[in-house]
Amino acid sequence: MTGLAVDDAAWASAWRRRAPGDKLLLCGGLVVTALVLPAWPGSALVGVVAVALAVGPARVPARTFLRATRWPAAFIVVGALTAVVEVGSGGPGWAPDAAARSGSLAGHALAGSAAVLLLATTTPMSDLLPALRRARVPDAVVEVASVVYRLLFVLLGSLHTIREAQTARMGYSSVRRSYRSSGALAAAVLTRSWDRARRMQEGLAGRGMETGLRVLPEVLPSSRAFLTGSVVALAAIVATSAVVA
């Protein structure tokens, strides 16, 4: 296990051997569709299709997919609530169209998040980063994404090691000790991660690594049937939204 449930799901997904470009087309199309079409029924259809594809053909565990949506959903709910509050002469209050506005905002955001998670739970980063390079995404953006991805595992490794040591010393045996141990854990993890990142940068600079480390990526064949199905699904969502609306 890597420590990231989404990453584990991507490696175990039935779509692991599909070309990243095919999945980027499908998921990118779903995101654009979710943003452009009305929240009802366009975004709702996008969300249903994304979840159905993830737990169906892609064989992503439903529990993993739903757990991955918790924090984005919480952020979206908070954002939707704060977006409909207005301050007038009588003080703060709800906007006249609060329900419609918050529903539209939450619908677009949730559907787009589901489409992005469909890509994340079916495509490992080792496949996605070379695909972004081939798509002419600026090298600086790809390198930043690669470094952040690698540092996530440094953070998780440090977190696991320090927490085990604290638990062995009864650091979480009471509420007071738990608060103290949690503060020390956050400080130690950030300090250790910053130090390892600095040493990594110095080591690469000492070897003359002024550009990104290039590797030979695995080339996965594109599927015409998959691309055709993606286009048909997107067209069906647009057509259904136009008819219902």
Image (cartoon, rainbow, N blue to C red):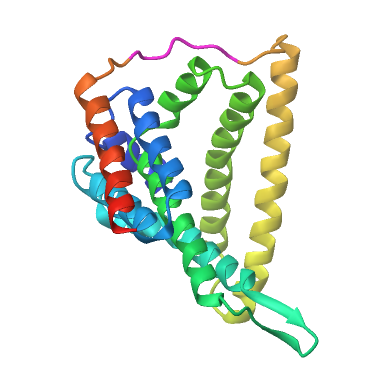
Residue 25 drawn above or below residue 220: below
Residue at the spot 51% in from the left edge and 51% down from the top edge: 160
Estimate the x, y position of residue 213 in percent, counting from the top left: 58, 14
Please say if 82 is above or below 166: below
Query: Measuring 23% from the left and 26% from the top, which residue is drawn there?
Result: 228
Q: Nearer the viewer, residue 3 or 42?
A: 42
Residue situated furthest bottom in the rendering: 90
Residue 183 lies, in percent from the top left, at 68, 65
Q: Which residue is pictured at 42% across the width and 50% down the height?
A: 37
Residue 228 visible from this viewpoint: yes
In-front residue for pair 183/14: 14
Residue at image x 32%, y 34%? 11
Figure check: 177 above or below 227:
below
Name the magenta segment's main secondary structure: loop
Which quadrant would the C terminus be assigned to in this image? bottom left
Image coordinates for residue 69, horizontal then vertical, percent: 41, 57
Question: What's the magenta region?
Answer: 213-219
Q: Please name whichever residue, 217 or 24, is drawn nearer the observer in this view of the structure.
A: 24
The part of the image, by quadrant, that contains residue 131 is: top left
* Image-quadrant location for residue 169: bottom right
**Quadrant of the snapshot with the N terminus:** top left
Q: Can residue 17 be seen from the camera position used here?
A: no
Direction from residue 23 to residue 106 in the image, left or right: right
Q: Is residue 39 magenta?
A: no
Direction from residue 183 to residue 25 in the image, left or right: left
Left or right of 61? Residue 166 is: right
Which one is nearer the viewer's eye here, 239 or 17? 239
> Number of labelled discs?
0
x then y, percent, for residue 12: 27, 37
